[in-house]
Image (cartoon, grey):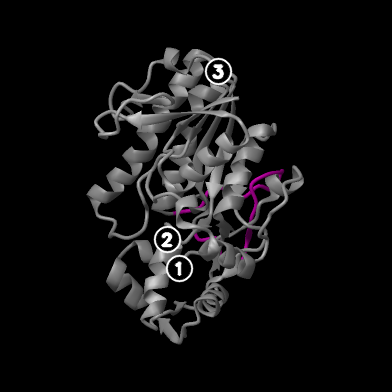
Amino acid sequence: MRIAIAGSSGLIGTAVAEALTARGDTVVRLIREGSGIPPAPGRLAWDPDGAGIAPSALAGVDAVIDLCGSPIAGRRWTGAVKQELRDSRLHPTLALADAVAGEGVPVLLNASAVGFYGNAGESVCVDAGADATAVGDGFLADLCAEWESATGAASAAGARVAHLRFGHVLSAAGGLLPIMKRVYQFALGGRLGSGHQYLPWIERSDAARAVLHVLDSQLSGAVNITGPDPARQAAFSEALARRLGRPAPWVVPKSVLRLVVGEIADEGLLASQRAVPRALRDDGFLFAYPGLDAALAAAFDAPFGAHGAAGA
């Protein structure tokens, strides 16, 4: 197959592109104009914040995978940052959905996140079936819902559209783990708030394999890209401490988290999303790393070069 990928230089995009190439697919990387990356075979320049991409540029493409989006964590959510988070997701998605519709590309896989569910507490967040979990409350939930709706032109044109709701992707090369590793190396790890909140995770190679499974299947709509057993934050902290051989004795109260990082504390660190991969499971997907300890071991043991760089 011939697959166009936006966001191919990111943590997930790199893994997906490598997995597709390894099995013999042709990958077309959509590169932002002005990025400084020179033209080359297999690269296609586009302008997601302006002219988008001409539908004819997708001629002969069997599917588009959109993994664009600037990082959520690592900074306070000022008004300008929130606008950047929206623009970096909605502009590419709207442009690609229009191009998919215009060229008649049959498949669009579009990134989303478990933030769609808001703070769901103890409830199990499922992606498929009559009891699929509805959108939650808060900035992230609203953003994810708007992000998914931005694919509407592709759906209306008859494309199969899947919304890939990613949990925390475990990799030593980017995402959550490098940040936490630095904290734990200074013996500052521990529980955040009560520690009872659920943290949905998935090992990076399993995440890439899951994306390919959705590509090859007939799955559409929401698909949770998460491991089968979301962990409470306290249990995740303990497992990470064991893996790193470092203590994790601290408890960081909610009030301190809110003071230090602002709004993201409630939606990104203290929110509970007990997201499970019902759609993947029911479609026969098998995880290589279904348990947290094995997933952490794989994340830290994988060669850095196999992970690529973090980014959108």
Return the disc, 3 or 2, that comes first in the chain's sequence.
Answer: 3
Callout 2: helix, strand or loop? helix
Q: How far is mark 3 from mark 1, CA to CA?
A: 39 Å
Quarter that holds the C terminus: top left
Whether the residues at callouts 1 and 2 have beta carbons within 8 Å, the answer is yes
**Quadrant position of residue 214:** top right
Q: Position of residue 119 (x, y in %)?
A: 50, 61
Q: How far is mark 3 from mark 2, CA to CA?
A: 34 Å
Q: Which mark is residue 270?
A: 1
Residue for badge 3: 157
Asked if residue 158 lies left or right of residue 248, the reply is: right
Within the magenta stretch, is there residue 121? yes
Return the disc, 3 or 1, that comes first in the chain's sequence.
Answer: 3
Q: Nearer the viewer, residue 267 or 137?
A: 267
Q: Position of residue 147 (x, y in %)?
A: 44, 38
Asked if residue 248 lies left or right of residue 71, the reply is: right
User: What is the three-letter code of the residue carrying label 1?
Assistant: Leu
Q: Residue at image x 41%, y 39%?
A: 68
Q: Dominant secondary structure of the magenta stretch?
A: loop
**Quadrant position of residue 122:** bottom right
- State whether residue 50 appears in this view: yes
User: What is the three-letter code of the residue carrying label 3?
Assistant: Ala
Q: Which residues are magenta?
A: 119-137
Residue for badge 2: 267
Within the magenta stretch, is there residue 294? no
